[in-house]
Image: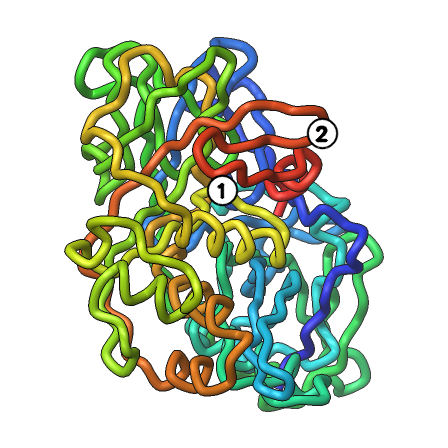
Amino acid sequence: MQPVRRAPPDLTGAWPVRTACPQCAGAVELEAGDPILSCGYCRTRLYLISRGPPRYRMAVHGVAHASDILWIPFWRFRGIRYRVLDDPARVEGGLLDATVAACSSTPSSANLGIRLQVAPLNLDSGDGRRVPEDQTPAEALADVEERVEALQAQTPLFTRLIGESVCLVSAPCALEERGGVWWMRELIPDGGVHPLTDAQAQALGTASRAEVGQNRVSFLPLLCPECGHDLAAAPGAVALLCGHCARGWWVRGSRFSPLPCAARAAKNPGARYFPFWELTFRADGLPVSNRGELRRWVISYQPVPTGWERQPCQVLVPGFKLEPRVFVRLARIMTLAPLEAPAESFPPGNLVDAEPVRLTLSEAAQALKIVLAFLAQGRRPGLAAVVGARMRVRGARLLYLPFHRRGGEWVEEETGAAIQSTSVQHGSRL
């Protein structure tokens, strides 16, 4: 069992990564997990695509020959972890930020702690003596969640990690023998020295001689595949918009593909468009088969808008990151609001000012059951039904809705739903 080190709540979680521009070789800095590379020298803008989770390395600190360095892998997880509880019925959420050893031979006393947030990383070049990971991200995350739950007073009905960021960070170490005892010395700032059993030392030495797959990273120019104009991109964006031809794009495989999306035209100038994932779904085990029944199931004392009985069940999940409570509250308001479906295309030229999409479709689908639990949290029978229900997403698109600034809030035109601007700013760093 490897230790989990959770970051203090006042840290933003940003891990700086240094690399070189593939066009001019100028120094570029971005955040770990961010796919957007912007060079301040040659103005090159690229989208990074890695095979599997992004891989990084910590800088070597201390005297060591390159042949003596042993690269030890650690998984890093970051996201909003929701817990659904039944006594009383409620949904709780909080930030999970954890690193855990990806190799079972790593001594239990070794962990990265918060060093990653004060020492820049580098993209993993793939060379040197590398210890391969023998624990998958899913296995490591299950281990993390098990130990986090051991600290809680109440066992949840179920949990979900939303907005999950996963990467593999390799730390430089050296194996040393002193007086017949093997030690692992961390070649990082304030690095420790950890005793090894003979079995651990042998396993690490043997593993470092095994072949490890290369970290292949490819680059896509941030240009619209349709018209060739620049694509608007902010740090961490997973969907891209072209302000010229009003097309939306996302990465599928190794290229940009058309993104199913729509937008409601603003009634007044000065709007900022906020993205929502519109998910239509089927829930086996819930007493709902259409949009009208879903609203009646949640709000039984209000009439159902005309036409909702003929529409499939759907929820609107924010496509941008927010604090846990704000995220589910906004999803509830927008899901139950009497909104009419907008046109299938963007209003030309109106989406230049849009909040970046930082929540992927798969993460929005993971949030579906959490949103339904939040809708039903006032009634224990309803919450129990959500727990046992089987969810199936049947359709999805990105829906942009116009919000206007009023004081310290962003207010949606049709529903009056308000979001504190500080919540939006804080969410962009989650």
- Tell me what residue is drawn at x 20 percent, y 12 percent: 227
Judging by the rendered image, the residue that carries numbered circle 1 is: 320
**Above or below for 411 versus 76:** above
- Tell me what residue is drawn at x 53 percent, y 49 percent: 56
Q: Camera-side residue: 72 or 356?
A: 356
Note whether residue 71 is visible: no
Judging by the rendered image, the residue that carries numbered circle 2 is: 408
Q: Where residue 428 sits in the image (x, y, percent)?
A: 59, 39
**Above or below for 429 versus 129:** above
Corner quadrant of residue 225: top left
Q: Is residue 167 left or right of residue 425?
A: left
Q: Where residue 379 sits in the image (x, y, percent)?
A: 51, 80
Q: Camera-side residue: 327 or 131?
A: 327
Q: Camera-side residue: 427 or 403?
A: 403
Which is in the foreground here, disc 2 or disc 1?
2
**Above or below for 202 versus 19:** below
Note whether residue 278 is visible: yes
Residues at circles 2 and 1 in contact by the CB criterion of under 8 Å: no
| Colour pattern of the rendering | rainbow
